Image (cartoon, helix red, strand yellow):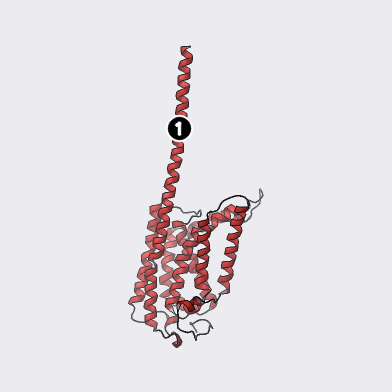
Amino acid sequence: MDHSGHGMNMDLPPFTLGRGLELSADPFFLIGCLVALALYGWGVARLVRRGDKWPVGRTVSFVIGILTVLLVMCTKLNDYGMVMFSVHMVQHMVISMLSPILLLLGAPITLALRALPVAARGHKGPREWLLWLLQSRYVKIITHPAFTIPLFIASLYALYFTPLFDTLMGSKAGHIGMMVHFLAVGLVFFWPIMGVDPGPHRPGHIFRMLELFAGMPFHAFFGIALMMATQPMIGTYMHPPASLGIDALSDQEAAGGIAWAFSEIPSVVVLVALLFQWRKSEDREARRKDRAADRDGDKDLEAYNAYLASLAARGR
C-alpha cells in the first residue's frame, strides 16, 4: 500500500514557510470552516439586530480558531504533511491543541442558545435539541475527565506507535478522519477545563488546572520518545521524496521536538484563561454578597425605624 500521500504528486520542492502557506484547499475542511463562520456570523448578527450585545473578543477568538484550521488543512502545509513528519506534527499540534482553545473561547454553544428561536409549546426546535444534547448522558461521558484524559493520551501513543497511523494515511478519507479526530479530541478535552460554554462537568478552578496538567506531560514524553529513537518509527515517513532533500530520522527528531515544545503553549494559554475566569467569578461572587448585604442592611434599617416609630407611638 502507498502510504505517502494517497495519489498526491510526490515531486514536492524543498519545504519553506512561504511555500507551505500557498493555498491548497482540502474541500472537506474548507467547506466545514466556511459553514462554521457563516453560522457564527448569523448568530452574532441576530443578536445585534434585536439589540443584544456579544463580546467582540469572543468573535475574534472564534474567527482566529477557524483560520488556524484553514492554515494547516487548506494550504500546502497539508501536502507537505503527507510526506514530512515534522510538518504533519505542526498540523497535529495546531488542530488538536491551539484551534480547540480558540474555538472554545469563542463560546459557540452559548451563542447558539442565545440566537436560536424558542420553539412553540409542545414542539422541539434546534435550540431544544441542543439543550437536550448538552444534558444527555452521552455528553456527560465524553466530557468526563475519566474519558477525556485517557483519550487525549491514546490519540498520541495508540495512533503513532501502532500500524493504525499508516493505515489511516493510506487513504484520503482516513487522513481526513484522523484530523477531524484530533480536533474533536482537543475540543472535548479543553471544554470542561476552560470552555466558556455551559457543559455537564464544570469543576472548581483548581481541579480544572489539575486536569490540564494531567494530560500535558504525556505530550512532552511522546516528543522525547521520538527525539531519542535511533531509527524511523513511522512507516509513512520512512522514505521521504528525494526532491525534499531530508533525512527521515532527522525529520522525526524535528517532529519530536515540535511535539515536546508545543505542549507548553496551550498550557500557558489555558492557565491564563483559567486565572482570568477565576478572577471574574470571584468578582461576581463578591458583588452578589455585597448586594445581599445591602438588602440585609436595608431590612435592618427598616426594622429599626419601625421600632423607633413604635416607641414614639407609645410615648404619645
Residue projecting furthest to the bottom: 242
Which residue: 42% across, 42% down?
Answer: 286
In the picture of the structure, the residue carrying the numbered disc 1 is 296
Let me know if residue 128 appears in the view.
Answer: no
Q: Position of residue 199 (x, y in %)?
A: 50, 54
Q: Secondary structure at mark 1?
A: helix
Residue type of the residue flagged with mark 1: Asp
Dot 1 crowding, Cα within 10 Å, few <14, some 14–19, many 20+? few
Front residue of 182 and 273: 273
Q: Which of the 4 image quarters holds residue 218?
A: bottom left
Q: Which of the 4 image quarters holds residue 290?
A: top left
Front residue of 201 and 60: 60
Which residue: 50% across, 68% down?
Answer: 68
Residue projecting furthest to the top: 316
Let me know if residue 306 appears in the view.
Answer: yes
Which residue: 51% across, 64% down?
Answer: 64
Q: Which of the 4 image quarters holds residue 247?
A: bottom left
In the figure, 283 relative to 74: above or below? above
Which residue: 38% across, 56% down?
Answer: 209
Q: Position of residue 226 (x, y in %)?
A: 36, 75
Q: Position of residue 132 (x, y in %)?
A: 57, 54
Front residue of 274 and 184: 274
Give the mark count. 1
Q: Position of residue 246 (x, y in %)?
A: 40, 84
